[in-house]
Image (spheres, rainbow, N blue to C red):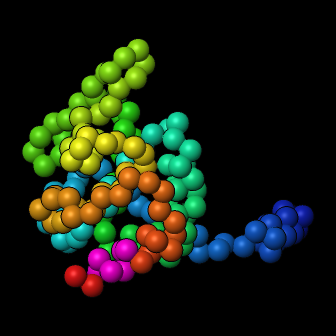
Amino acid sequence: MKNPKLYLIFLIVGILFPLTGFSQIVSQSFEQLDVLQKTQSRFVVVFIHTDWCKYCQAMKNTTFEDKEIAALLNQNFWFLDLNAEEKSDITFNGQTYKFRPTGNNTGIHELVEKFTMPDGNSSYPILCILNTNYEIIFQHNQFLSVNDLRLFLNDLLKI
């Protein structure tokens, strides 16, 4: 190496900050879901959140940052991340859903309404599990810890 100081810096950085096999959940888009299901049929996990929801952010930063959860989701499920206040149109299962304003600078995406509780409750975060026909088979409207989500996903894989 021409510059021994540069080599030494890379060596020190490599020792102090080793690659840890960090894994991240791969989020798919609703538009590509049909193609993905044709390649490999899987349950679909839809995580619905908002930017202002502290429990949503906590779930993103803890539950979904867990290496085991990330591996479990990436290997066995299609994961979809949906901001409830997304303003762009989303095509899902042959239908286009739009943002619906509910006031000044507020609103909800129509697709979120499809995944809300039968009573219309849309408290965040919402975790929906869809079967291969895109029917809701599980829905949870609050924070899920790493352990709770791990137990549920493993039980679901036994079906």
- Residue 7 in view in this figure: no
Horizontal side, residue 13 vs residue 117: left or right: right
Q: Position of residue 63 (x, y in %)?
A: 52, 64
Q: Position of residue 143 (x, y in %)?
A: 48, 56
- Quadrant placement of the C terminus: bottom left
Observer-nearest of 38 and 136: 136
- Residue 98 in view in this figure: yes
Furthest residue toward top? 104
Residue 94, picture quadrant: top left
Residue shown at the point (15%, 66%) measured from the top left? 132
Observer-nearest of 25 and 51: 51
In the image, is residue 152 above or below residue 111?
Answer: below
- Quadrant placement of the N terminus: bottom right
Q: Position of residue 142 (x, y in %)?
A: 44, 54
What is the magenta range? 152-157
Residue shown at the point (12%, 40%) measured from the top left? 95
